[in-house]
Image (cartoon, helix red, strand yellow):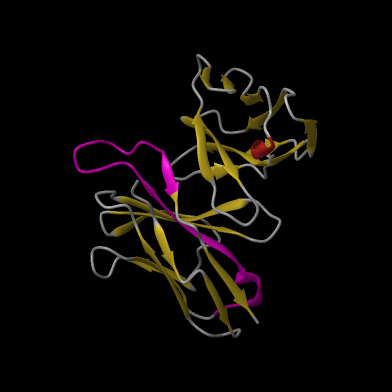
Amino acid sequence: RKEVEQDPGPFNVPEGATVAFNCTYSNSASQSFFWYRQDCRKEPKLLMSVYSSGNEDGRFTAQLNRASQYISLLIRDSKLSDSATYLCVVTPVDKLSFGAGTTVTVRA
Amino acid sequence: EPEVTQTPSHQVTQMGQEVILRCVPISNHLYFYWYRQILGQKVEFLVSFYNNEISEKSEIFDDQFSVERPDGSNFTLKIRSTKLEDSAMYFCATDQGALTSPKTDTQYFGPGTRLTVL
């Protein structure tokens, strides 16, 4: 089983739509959880950390379910600039384990 | 805003040659990492480095790879004898942890070095 699994998408949504996707992780000892964003051929950039209580940052909402070992990201009121690959990241030990990414394309 | 820098942005080399990729971490960060991303694939952990020694490495990080911090500022990744399959984007990352605070697991990535092995 892969350490981090994500639905690759692509999710193709119109501007203003809501899009949500999940990721699952295999190591129950994972301590920290993040969503990173990666634009084509660029470095991953931290979007937000994910906490058990759920957290929101503007139009982005992240949830963590430790019992089921999944993480979710919801994007409200999608903008063209949200088009990117979203990487689910967990930290089982002293490193980041990345999912393969979920591609989101927001169309005008 | 402080940022991680990497040089060169693109390196082309012949198979069997040695390459050194350089990273300048955010100042006062003490935890350093190298990751690689083969085109079209996920980001993969290579090695973590703290207090002038490797703290963890992946199975990818074999004897052909080495890291060091030669002058207290640069953090380098050396590949001794490059292979075609080493062609990838190599990212350096640093953690906010400092002398007076624990590692946070929040890592900041440099822009990457694209390595092409011919």
Whether the magenta-drawn stretch holds residue B11 is answered as no
* Quadrant of the snapshot with the C terminus of chain A: top right
User: B4 or B101: which is nearer to us?
Assistant: B4
Where B21 sits versus B14, above or below? above
Residue A94 location, quadrant: top left
Tag count: 0
Residue A96 placement (x, y as % from top left): 50, 43
Residue B83 placement (x, y as % from top left): 61, 77
**Residue at figure coordinates x 51%, y 17% from the top left:** A52
Residue B40 placement (x, y as % from top left): 71, 56
Q: Which residues are magenta?
A: B82-108
**Is A64 displayed left or right of A22 in the figure?**
left
* Quadrant of the snapshot with the N terminus of chain A: top right
User: A52 or A37: which is nearer to us?
Assistant: A37
In the image, farthest residue toward the left: B100
Whether the magenta-drawn stretch holds residue B96 is answered as yes
Q: Is residue B117 visible?
A: yes
Q: Is residue A2 visible?
A: no
